[in-house]
Amino acid sequence: DTEVTQTPKHLVMGMTNKKSLKCEQHMGHRAMYWYKQKAKKPPELMFVYSYEKLSINESVPSRFSPECPNSSLLNLHLHALQPEDSALYLCASSSQGRGNYGYTFGSGTRLTVV
Amino acid sequence: GENVEQHPSTLSVQEGDSAVIKCTYSDSASNYFPWYKQELGKRPQLIIDIRSNVGEKKDQRIAVTLNKTAKHFSLHITETQPEDSAVYFCAASITGSARQLTFGSGTQLTVLP
């Protein structure tokens, strides 16, 4: 399995809702990432997990809460989002070893906040 | 932190012509430089990458060159085809432990039939 699977593919939520995005990989990668991407812009890093521990938080508002239950799963819990949070949320994973460098991106969750 | 600049922001070429996209980076510690192609509504897909111990890498119609001294790297696409039309992102990172990719701002490539 050489893929990163994200669910759901599309999500519409109100500003008072609570929802979660899910990401799963079975490549044995020990680093996992959440990126946010606006239309025609590059992906922006949100969080990095290394060996299931949060190692980087790029000053993301607390309405986004990441969770890494195990080495294969990464969640992003959403609460009280704003319309400007509407974007494509991408999960990625990578190997920690020096011999491997590439990221594998999931297909993303297209989030619309209404 | 790392800063990656990418030019041009848009590029139109005739089918069959070559396309060149250029990036510069700021952190001399960066040693891994991937290029991603992103079609509308889809995920970024790695198309080629280069490590800092290599000056050039080629894969069929795609090549990447790296000049470590000048801190710039370029993507070359030859014999362009309409299906090459997409947004291309360069990126830079430091290999080893969990690392963040710093992306360039992207180039919208349009191949005109």
Image (spheres, coloured by chain):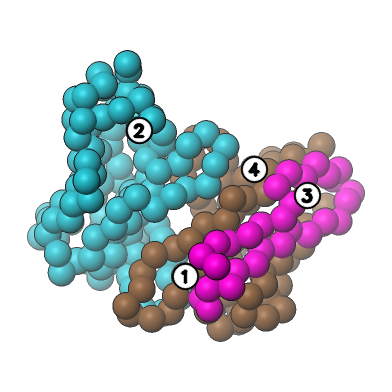
Please provide the residue range marked out in magenta: A1-29
Q: Which residue corresponds to the image point at 12% horizontal and 59% vertical from the top-left?
A: B55
Q: Which mark is residue A81?
A: 3
Q: Which chain does cyan denote in the image? A: B
- Residue A75 at what x, y percent from top left? 71, 66
Q: Which residue is mark 2?
A: B84
Q: Earlier in the sequence, mark 3 or mark 4?
A: 3
A61 over B87 or under it: above or below: below
Q: Which residue corresponds to the image point at 65% horizontal and 67% vertical from the top-left?
A: A24
> Looking at numbered disc 2 in the image, what kind of residue is underneath it?
Asp
Q: The disc numbered 1 marks a residue on which chain?
A: A
Q: Which residue corresponds to the image point at 62% horizontal and 50% vertical from the top-left?
A: A108
User: Does A23 appear in magenta?
Assistant: yes
Q: Secondary structure at mark 4?
A: strand
Q: The disc numbered 4 marks a residue on which chain?
A: A
For the residues bearing labels 3 and 4, Cβ distance under 8 angstroms: no
Q: Which residue is mark 1?
A: A94
- Residue B45 at what x, y percent from top left? 44, 50
